[in-house]
Image (cartoon, helix red, strand yellow):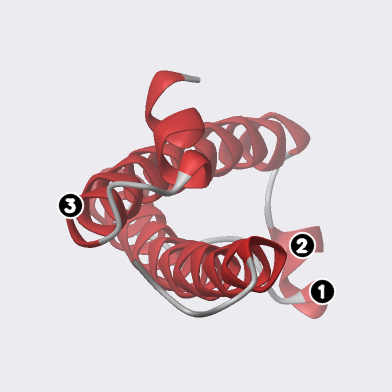
């Protein structure tokens, strides 16, 4: 058993899980952005409507469609990334309640 105070162990576990979740969230956001941009270009033949000066070149329906698709994709990829990070983290720290909650949520 460890000589550390249980509260200290919990704080360390909490910090490690937060760091793992933050890295997973950042990576999944980057991946989702690239997937949406490539998909949008493949389907529409035009770049994704991101730049403010380009927004007037798009129809309102295109911008709304892009917002819905990108929002759904970012959310899905983020959740899948967090679940994978939780599985990875719980395999290394089976005593952690944080990863278990993320997987079962």
Callout 3 crowding tier (Cα within 10 Å): few <14, some 14–19, many ≥20 = few
Residue 50, position in %: x, y? 66, 68
Q: CA distance from mark 1 to mark 3?
A: 44 Å
User: Mark 1 or 3, which is nearer the eye?
Assistant: 3
Q: CA distance from mark 3 to mark 2?
A: 46 Å
Q: Is residue 67 left or right of residue 73?
A: right
Q: CA distance from mark 1 to mark 2?
A: 5 Å
Foreground residue, 51 or 20?
A: 20
Compared to 101, does 8 lie above or below? below
Q: Kindly identify the residue that appears in the image at 42 percent across and 44 percent down.
A: 99
Q: Kindly identify the residue that appears in the image at 68 percent across and 51 percent down.
A: 58
Q: Circle 3 sits in a helix, a strand or a loop, which is it?
A: helix
Compared to 69, does 98 lie above or below? below
Q: Kindly identify the residue that appears in the image at 23 percent across and 53 percent down.
A: 42
Foreground residue, 80 or 43?
A: 80
Instruction: Return the residue at label 3.
Output: 91
Q: Kindly indicate whether the residue at mark 3 contacts the one at mark 1 (C-beta within 8 angstroms).
A: no
Instruction: Return the residue at label 1.
Output: 52
Q: Circle 1 sits in a helix, a strand or a loop, which is it?
A: helix
Residue 52, position in %: x, y? 82, 74
Residue 46, position in %: x, y? 41, 62
Of labels 1 and 3, earlier in sequence is 1
Q: Is residue 52 left or right of residue 77?
A: right
Q: Kindly indicate whether the residue at mark 2 contacts the one at mark 1 (C-beta within 8 angstroms).
A: yes
Foreground residue, 82 or 31?
A: 82
Residue 31, position in %: x, y? 34, 66
Instruction: Return the residue at label 2.
Output: 55
Q: Is residue 83 left or right of residue 74?
A: left
Which of the 4 quarters of the picture holds residue 60? top right
User: Mark 3 or 2, which is nearer the eye?
Assistant: 3
Q: Kindly identify the residue that appears in the image at 67 percent across and 73 percent down.
A: 8
Q: Quadrant of the N terminus?
A: bottom left
């Amino acid at each position: 058993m460890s000589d550390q105070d249980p509260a200290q162990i919990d704080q360390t576990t909490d910090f490690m899980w937060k760091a793992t979740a933050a890295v997973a969230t950042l990576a999944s956001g980057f991946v989702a952005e690239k997937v949406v941009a490539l998909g949008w270009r493949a389907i529409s033949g035009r770049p994704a409507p991101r730049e403010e000066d380009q927004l007037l070149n798009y129809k309102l329906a295109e911008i709304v469609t892009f917002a819905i698709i990108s929002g759904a994709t970012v959310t899905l990829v983020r959740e899948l990334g967090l679940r994978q990070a939780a599985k990875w983290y719980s395999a290394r720290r089976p005593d952690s309640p944080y990863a278990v909650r993320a997987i079962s949520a």
